[in-house]
Amino acid sequence: MFISLDGIDGAGKSTQIDLLRQHLVAKGASVECFRDPGSTKLGEAVREILLHREDIPLSNTSEMLLYMAARAQLVSEQLRPALDAGTTVVCDRFLLANVVYQGVAGGLNIDDLWAVGFCATGGLSPDATIVLDIDPEVAVKRLQRGPDRLEKRGLEYFRLVRNGFLEQISRAGGQVMVVNADQSIEQIHRQIVEFIDLLLS
């Protein structure tokens, strides 16, 4: 099973991914977790450029294509081999994020992004996509580090991102779920595992 968790930074993805991994392992599953972009040498190098190399100017299209390139490598090098081996994959972000950040909030054509994404992933899409939904003002207060390149774009940009996730999640593939991330960690985790366990039953 291929599960993707998404949402704006500060929604609690990392915490929920770790809790979900523990839950699935306790049920006897073999689980691997990845991040998009990242989890390959190419992906980590691209991630550094995208999020931290502010000395390198990026157009919206260049930014989008770098994300797509990192994702293509992630799919071929990590995701498909893991899924083919019967491993449950949990991924921190996937194509939906690209569509939302560079399309809905960034102004690129949304249908074009889905099409390019289909090419980059070889048609691979999650069996389940979970979006942690939260007010950007609340999310910003949760961040425990300095803002990266995207996070410096401000609240109005992230309001567009939040709305984009809600608008586009139905196109993410597989079963989809939106969770109110302005709850306790335990409440969010319980809703996620109930959703996933139902799909696995």
Image: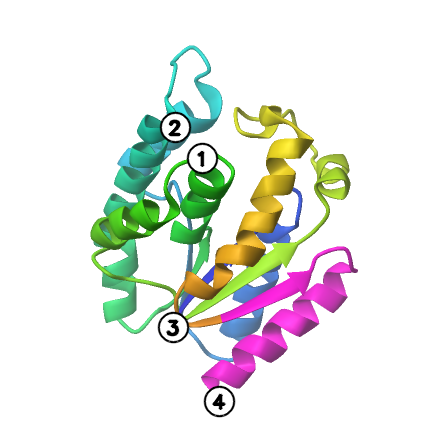
Q: Nearer the viewer, residue 117 or 146?
A: 117
Mark-to-mark CA distance, 3 and 1: 32 Å
In which quadrant of the rendered view does residue 152 lie?
top right
Under tag 3, what secondary structure?
A: loop
Query: Badge 4 local density, few (<14 within 10 Å), some, or many (20+)?
Result: few
* Residue 52 coordinates in the image, percent (x, y): 47, 22
Marks 3 and 4, how far apart at CA: 12 Å
Q: Looking at numbered disc 1 in the image, what kind of residue is underneath it?
A: Gly
Q: Mark 3 and 4 residues: CB-CB less than 8 Å, in contact? A: no
Query: For this view, does 11 lie left or right of residue 23?
Result: right
**Magenta-drawn segment:** 176-201
Within 10 Å of the Cα at label 1, are there few (<14), some (14-19), or many (20+) other Cα atoms? few
| Quadrant including the N terminus | bottom left
- Tell which of 167 and 77 is nearer to you: 167
User: Disc 4 marks which amino acid?
Assistant: Ser
Q: Are marks 2 and 1 in contact (CB under 8 Å)?
A: yes
Query: Going by the image, does 184 lie left or right of 97?
Result: right
Which badge, 4 or 1, comes first in the chain's sequence? 1
Q: Indicate which disc residue 201 carries.
A: 4
Residue where numbered disc 1 is placed: 107
Secondary element at image label 1 = loop
**Residue 155, position as x, y percentages in the image:** 68, 32
Q: Is residue 123 visible?
A: yes
Instruction: Answer whether residue 138 is magenta in the image.
Output: no
- Give the mark count: 4
Identify the residue at horizontal 59%, vertical 26% (top origin). Answer: 153
**Mark 2–mark 3 contact, CB under 8 Å?**
no
Residue hosting label 2: 60
